Image (tube, helix red, strand yellow):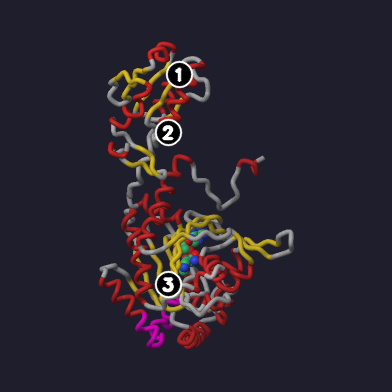
Amino acid sequence: MALLTQAPKGTQDVLPQESYKWQYVEQLTMEIAKLYGFQEMRVPTFEHTELFNRSVGDTTDVVQKEMYTFLDKGNRSITLRPEGTAGMARAAIQNGLLNGALPVKVSYNVSCFRYEKPQAGRLREFHQFGAEVYGSDSPACDAEVIAMVHEIFDTLGVKDLTLELNSIGCPTCRAEYHKALIAYFKAHQEKLCETCLGRLEKNPMRILDCKSPVCAEIAKDAPKVLDYICDDCKSHFEGLKNRLDSLKIPYIINPNIVRGLDYYTKTVFEFVTNSIGAQGTVCGGGRYDGMIEQLGGPKLAGIGFAMGLERLIKVMEASGAEFPQRTPCTIYIGSIGEEASVKAFALVNELRKEGFYAECDTVGRSVKAQMKYADKLGCQFSCILGDNELAAGKALVKNMSTGETKEVAFDDLVDFIYDEQVSVITCGIEQANITEEK
Ligand code: HAM
């Protein structure tokens, strides 16, 4: 029975009393992205497994251990997306988006799936807001993307986030760096954990990211990537820093940021916080200049980021950020008897068409219970229709906070509500009602 009433481990329900926070965050991130020229793209939840093997990389933890992969009934290997970047790139290539004017900028809100050990801030199904830019290898583009993330956090009222930057170089200079890392870690290999031993030859940079205290201690003195990057990568990194400085966006250089996905080149970055527990990386991103070509697309640079919405909402709460109030019910129109109930239903419908949140009885409650319910909804106004009101064509409308009452003709009810300047609902977010909008 528990299987019927328990969600799978690592998943989370967003309850009605919390969903307004999600709507706010999803809407605002997309709105800000529009100011930076991004347009939403939607792609399937699952892709061919090969897409993630190729892009995310088959030496990564995500591909090796965390993907939800299954054979479909046609015997194809299918994977629920563990992140958004690969599917976006696939869709951009497949639909010829990269053949027109560049850069192409896309944004997305997606659910992602990773079979990780669930803990606070780490889920098996989670949600990302992300954005990708295709077709610019300029550091101006890195700066633009990072400035947008900074602006989003700022607008949402997030505090105590640090931007950490690094450059992991291009394939040419990284080859030299890998050699130096392998030599360094080989000298300590008897102390490395099992996982890092496996990473030593194939992906030595991932050892820098290991959470085991022994490996972390060894990694402290490992060669630093910024000492190995070529002149081109160095000047790219300088170009980015100059632009962030010009916008007064604070950052620290963290040479241990390597990111957990294989496609990155040059710039990598994370926005981290200490205020939401161990899983403090709210946003991660970077450049991936070889990935589009590797997937069979044109030779185009790429850069992007994704922020986890569960972590974003947590850090907003920890920052005391304000979420817009849930829209309260404007008016409850109660009724006594069938005829009055039909009239109440019609009036409520009329008000809803005007953008007001209105309610009437759909349960068959007593008048007393209807009023109790209206109170629970936090209605701004209420009235009761009975035989007398129907005969007179008007009702006594009560302002629930002041207790004042006013007789209002049914035909004037919409005008009355407008004149009272109560809120209307626009795209799910409450806005002040403006009389001229009538
Ligand atoms: P990522 O660092 O793997 O990067 O994930 C981005 C964000 O998703 C993380 O910073 C975190 O907030 C959230 N996240 C990741 N895993 C979990 C989880 N198990 N539970 C809850 N939240 C999680 C990417 O996914 C890249 N695609 C970002 C990117 C876009 N790079 C370039 N373009």
Which disc number belongs to residue 352?
2
Mark 1 — residue? 335
Q: Which residue is drawn at 49% across and 15% down?
A: 337
Counting the numbered discs, the total is: 3
Is residue 191 in view from this perspective? no
Which amino acid lies under the numbered mark 2 shown in the image of this protein? Arg
Neighbourhood count class around disc 3 (C-alpha, 10 Å): few under 14, some 14–19, many 20 upward = some
Q: Considering only vertical position in the picture, is 378 above or below 409?
A: below
Gap between marks 1 and 3, in whole Å?
Answer: 59 Å
Q: Is 41 within the magenta? A: no
Q: What stretch is highlighted in magenta?
A: 216-236
Q: What element carries label 2?
A: helix
Mark 1 or mark 3, earlier in chain: 3
Q: Name the residue under label 3.
A: 103
The nearer-to-camera label among 1 and 3 is 3
217 falls in the magenta region: yes
Amino acid at circle 1: Ser
Residue 184, how many percent across, how many down? 48, 85
Mark 3 in CB contact with mark 2 (< 8 angstroms): no
